[in-house]
Image: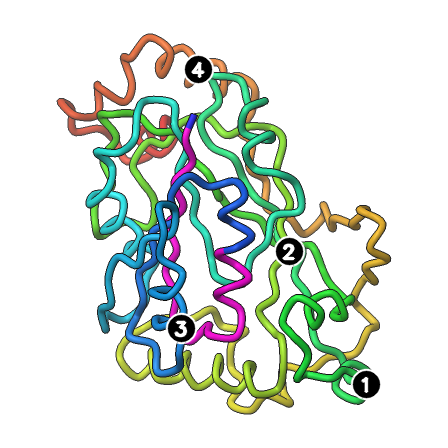
């Protein structure tokens, strides 16, 4: 079993080396697509190039999830049926070993969701942390988080899989696993980095990138928060998941059983290649 990571980055020069070193522990190949960073992200990726880390391309396209499809279609020839592909961001670090986690997933399950343990900078952090520390030490000092977001992170490869460069994910990925994998997400790391993140987003918005409604900040201080609605990481391996806020990733049992039969027999998704289906049925069978 091989694991291929798809990493689309822009202006992540402070953390990209830590990300690639960490992901190299479990990924067989990490393909990096740089959105023409204005900092030293790309230079650091190129300097780390080896048999696992592949600086694939620089391109100034406006960011969208479907950029990963370009990498996938360029390198899918390296994958065999049953290998896994991962959507990896430069500020993410897996809490549990993805290789061990994926090895335990039953063959009839095809998609693994990840729960983001998202860390935030607090007013206390701004007053107390030394933001000149090496990144690994700095990340260990950022302790307040919320775990309320989840989305697909890994999918199992099939040779007949289709991933259009207009889509954020391949079509008809299959049945999601019940178990979700946890990863740490450090989108806020220092005042300088937060401001660069905001400026990068604002620049992309002017070029047509549609962002989520909650992203309205124009200055880094607007992203600094209180601890009132955050949880504290005691670094004991336990995390509070806010299940009432996490999206439901499993379908009803009857749906899962039907999908298991159709995928297992090869009726679906092969059927989708030959039929124009009702959109609701297509969504049901995805």
Disc with the residue nearer the chain's start (1 vs 2): 1
Label 4, label 2: how far apart the Cα atoms are: 31 Å
* Residue at the spot of label 3: 41
Disc with the residue nearer the chain's start (4 vs 2): 2
Which of the 4 image quarters holds residue 96? top right
* Residue at the spot of label 2: 184
Disc with the residue nearer the chain's start (2 vs 3): 3
In the image, is residue 79 above or below residue 268?
Answer: below
Q: Is residue 212 left or right of residue 134?
A: left
Q: Residue 23, position in %: x, y? A: 51, 49
Q: Which mark is residue 128?
A: 1
Label 1, label 4: how far apart the Cα atoms are: 52 Å
Does dot 3 land on a helix, a strand or a loop? helix
Q: Which mark is residue 260?
A: 4
Tell me how the rendering is colored.
Answer: rainbow
In the image, 255 versus 242, the foreground residue is 242
Disc with the residue nearer the chain's start (4 vs 3): 3
Q: Residue 231, position in %: x, y? A: 81, 61
């Amino acid at each position: 079993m091989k694991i291929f990571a798809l990493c689309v980055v822009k202006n992540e020069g402070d953390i990209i080396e830590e990300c690639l070193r960490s992901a190299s522990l479990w990924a067989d190949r990490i393909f990096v697509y740089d959105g023409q960073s204005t900092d030293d992200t790309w230079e650091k990726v190129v300097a780390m190039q080896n048999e696992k880390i592949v600086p694939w391309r620089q391109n100034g396209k406006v960011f969208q999830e479907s950029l990963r499809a370009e990498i996938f279609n360029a390198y899918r020839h390296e994958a065999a049926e049953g290998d896994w592909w991962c959507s990896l961001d430069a500020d993410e670090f897996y809490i549990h070993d993805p290789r061990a986690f994926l090895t335990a997933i039953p063959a009839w399950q095809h998609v693994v969701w990840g729960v983001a343990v998202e860390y935030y900078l607090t007013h206390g952090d701004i007053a107390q942390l030394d933001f000149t520390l090496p990144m690994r030490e700095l990340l260990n000092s950022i302790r307040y988080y919320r775990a309320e977001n989840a989305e697909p992170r890994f999918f199992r490869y099939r040779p007949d899989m289709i991933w259009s460069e207009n889509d954020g994910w391949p079509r008809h990925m299959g049945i999601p696993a019940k178990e979700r994998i946890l990863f740490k997400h450090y989108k806020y790391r220092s005042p300088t980095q937060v401001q660069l993140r905001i400026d990068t987003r604002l620049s992309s918005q002017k070029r047509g990138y549609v962002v989520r409604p909650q992203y309205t900040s124009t200055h880094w201080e607007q992203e600094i928060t209180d601890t009132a609605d955050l949880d504290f990481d005691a670094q004991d391996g336990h995390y509070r998941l806010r299940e009432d806020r996490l999206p439901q990733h499993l379908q009803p049992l009857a749906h899962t059983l039907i999908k298991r039969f159709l995928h297992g027999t090869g009726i679906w998704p092969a059927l989708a290649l030959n039929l124009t289906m009702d959109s609701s049925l297509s969504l049901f069978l995805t």
